[in-house]
Amino acid sequence: MTASAQTTAAIDGAALLDEVEAFHRRFNVFPTEAAYVAVTLWDAHAHMLDAFDSTPRLAFLSPEPGSGKSRALEVVETLVPRSMAAVDASAAALFRSVSGIDGGRPTILFDEIDTIFGPKAGDNEQLRGFINAGHTRGRVMYRCVGDGSNQQVQGFPSFCAVAVAGLGSLPDTIMTRSVIIRMRRRARNERAEPFRTRIHVREGNLLRDQLAKWAETVQERVADAFPDTPDGVTDRPADVWEPLLAVADAAGGDWPRRAREACITLVKASQSNDKGSLGIRLLLDLRDHVLIGIDRLPTVAILDRLNALDDAPWADLNGKPLDNRRLSKMLGEYMTGDNDPIASRNIRTAGGVLKGFFAKDLEDAWARYCPPPTGATSATPLQPRSEPLPV
């Protein structure tokens, strides 16, 4: 049933969420199935905030530009109520928008959030406080209002849905309140439909209106719901996911199962800081200078080779050479072809078993973030060696 046909019939929540998910799939290439489920449920939850005690932040993050973050936010914008793009909005403007006299609580969308919280952004504690406080119903931000000596303390409500997109990471206080979608640059075999504003905003708005109508029919039931969270999901992650699970349960169909599977997947996902172009330099040096013709190498040998490279930054990173801990953290920002963070594994060497990295674990990141190798610089993984590797 199409969105337009549902306007004259009882709205099937599961079918409507299926349509919203399909709309995202046309324009967005998310890294996992769990991401499509989470974003769809987040779109729907924004229409029934009055039913919840908290609202998770939705964060599209990536280590590099060109990973589809802004497009994901564009599609979300068409589906949520009273969307408000806030690229350079001040904290004061946001306070007043959320407490607007018309009662229309906005859904706030921050693109390029790294310009607010990135290493060169300066002090943005008011914005950080606003995003943190707005996660929970009833939290207000107190500010002095008036002129000169005639000022009074006024509490501004901050509870609203917020979605952000940007490079790198976010302050920990926001990360723990967020559903994190780790965006990746599209691989050469991945396709997305071009997003045409004149056409597709209207299509998204039709779905938005249907979500609003459906929300009216289930909001009272959702407000009284205490959805079961998957085993192991407790404390802050449970608070983050409770509204999304409640929406899935109200929709029915396959959504309750898919929501809990997505919850487990994304709660377990890595939430480390991204390293931007320095990360790509690391990937390139590993491919083109360190793992040439080698299918695996102990970490100690990788560090020796990286730190010995001429015209490379690894021997002097803020006054220190690249070490095991930083190497593991940087590579952990990228994913294997199985959507697991790249991590060291045991390697048998002539001197025993050491931790190291396998070329095949890096292949997906090389394909997504690095230009195609040329000539002899290609690091083509070999079959695993049967003899111990020398250190």
Image: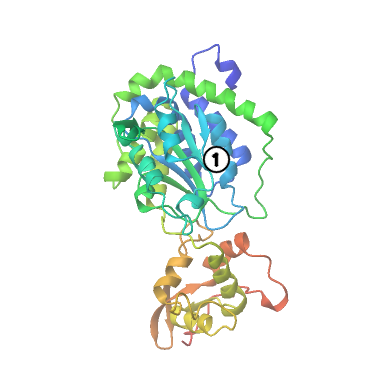
- Which residue occupies the foreground of this view, 305 or 57? 57
The residue to which callout 1 is attached is 73
Residue 142 lies, in percent from the top left, at: 30, 36
Q: Quadrant of residue 351?
A: bottom left
Residue placed at 53% from the left, 85% from the top? Answer: 308
SS label for mark 1: helix
Q: Is residue 342 left or right of residue 286?
A: left
Q: Is residue 291 left or right of residue 390?
A: right
Q: Is residue 344 above or below residue 63?
A: below
Residue 5 lies, in percent from the top left, at: 59, 16
Q: How many marks?
A: 1
Instruction: Name the image quarter holding the N terminus.
Output: top right
Protein image colouring = rainbow
Q: Is residue 288 above or below residue 110?
A: below
- Which residue occupies the foreground of this view, 96 or 381? 96
Q: Is residue 362 visible?
A: yes
Q: Is residue 247 left or right of residue 234?
A: right
Q: Is residue 344 visible?
A: no
- Which residue occupies the foreground of this view, 283 or 101? 101
Q: Residue pushed farthest top?
A: 8
Q: Residues within 10 Å of mark 1 (few under 14, many from 20)?
A: many
Residue 310 lies, in percent from the top left, at: 59, 84
Q: Residue pushed farthest right?
A: 375
Residue type at mark 1?
Leu
Residue placed at 53% from the left, 25% from the top? Answer: 208
